[in-house]
Image: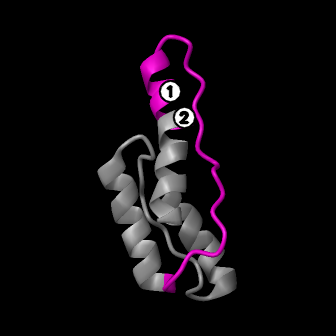
Amino acid sequence: NGEETMKSVDEKYKNQVHFFKCDVSNMNDFENAMKKTKETFKRIDILINNAAVCDERNWEKMVEVNVVGFFYKIFNNIT
């Protein structure tokens, strides 16, 4: 999981790694993660859209993550 990955990477980078759990298809989750990120780092210089799912049986979830989540990220950080 993300917390375990963060701990293993943090051993090398000594407190420079942070983990914020976020469902990008959920606007509240995303806004909270961005708030925590900005509180921790004061700003966001680079934003990489790396969330995606491929589920032919659940098109709604696929669109929420792959399309809607992407727009949440963009609009939340350019305003």
Vertical side of 51 occupied by 39: above or below: below
Vertical side of 78 occupied by 61: above or below: above
Total marks placed: 2
Inspect the image, locate mark 2, and give the three-letter code of the amino acid beneath it: Val
In the figure, is residue 43 to the left or right of 48? left
In the picture of the structure, the residue carrying the numbered disc 1 is 63
Q: Secondary structure at mark 1?
A: helix
In this view, the residue in front, 35 or 7, is 35
Q: CA distance from mark 1 to mark 2?
A: 5 Å
In the picture of the structure, the residue carrying the numbered disc 2 is 67
Residue 46 belongs to magenta span: yes
Tell me the crowding category of disc 1: few under 14, some 14 to 19, or many 20 or more residues within 10 angstroms, Cα based.
some
* The magenta segment: 41-66
Residue at position x 57%, y 75% in the image: 44
Inspect the image, locate mark 1, and give the three-letter code of the amino acid beneath it: Val
In the figure, is residue 50 to the left or right of 2? right
Residue 3 visible somewhere in the drawing? no
Residue 54 visible somewhere in the drawing? yes
The quadrant where residue 51 appears: top right
Residue 62 belongs to magenta span: yes
Q: Secondary structure at mark 2?
A: helix
Residue 74: where, in percent of width, then height?
55, 54
Main secondary-structure element of the magenta-colored stretch? loop
Residue at position x 51%, y 84% in the image: 41
Vertical side of 61 occupied by 76: above or below: below
Mark 1–mark 2 CB contact (< 8 Å): yes
Say the numbered circle drawn on residue 43.
none
Residue 29: where, in percent of width, then height?
34, 53
Outermost residue, front side: 79
Residue at position x 42%, y 54% in the image: 22
Residue at position x 61%, y 71% in the image: 8
